[in-house]
Amino acid sequence: MTKAHDLGKKAEKLAASYLQNSGYTLLAKNYRYLKAEVDLIVQKENTLVAVEVKARTIGFVLSPDQAVSPKKIKLLVEAVDHFVQSRELDVEVRFDLITYVFDGTHWEQNHITDAFYPFG
């Protein structure tokens, strides 16, 4: 595995732990549908949250929250729609972004709720 892959997997574990400690129920990790992958799908009360996790090392030119392209958003929306429809869930849906910056010793976390909207 590459360093970037390892960094991403560690960030996903940190995000899952953080969300569960914040009262969310983890429904799926790395949920795949067609060409999309949703890092984490969690639920709290009647809100299903699709979470994109981004991790970078300090000094990386592109900030983690700038790394979600319109194409990626479209794929995430399709995957989450499939997840909800296939399970016949009656929930509100929200898209969050959790970013991590690793400086070699410490992880800096930022949880952005309603990070983007499906159509706009």
Image (cartoon, grey):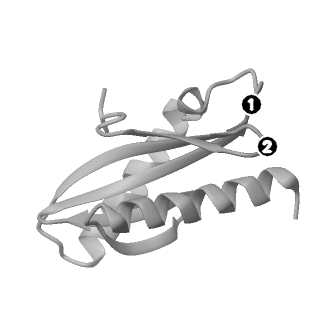
**Is 23 drawn above or below residue 52 in the view shown?**
below
Mark 2 is surrounded, within 10 Å at the Cα level, by few (under 14), some (14 to 19) or many (20 or more) other residues, namely few
Does 55 sit left or right of 14 as displayed?
A: right
Disc 2 residue type? Gly
Does 18 sit left or right of 9 as displayed?
A: left
Residue depth check, mark 2 versus mark 1: number of the one nearer the observer: 2
For label 1, the residue is 58
For label 2, the residue is 104
Q: Residue at x 50, y 71 (%)?
A: 29
Q: Percent from the top left, x then y, of residue 65?
A: 53, 31
The Cα–Cα distance between marks 2 and 1, rounded to whole angstroms, is 8 Å
Q: Are marks 2 and 1 in contact (CB under 8 Å)?
A: yes
- Which of pointers 2 and 1 lies earlier in the amino acid sequence? 1
* Visible residue check, residue 46: yes
Q: Residue furthest right?
A: 2
Q: Quick one: SS at disc 2?
A: loop
Q: Percent from the top left, x then y, of residue 41?
A: 38, 64
**Is 32 drawn above or below residue 96 in the view shown?**
below
Does 89 sit left or right of 86 as displayed?
A: left
Give whichever of 29, 19 is nearer the camera. Answer: 19
Q: Check residue 13 in the rendering and tell me which mark sits there, or answer none.
A: none
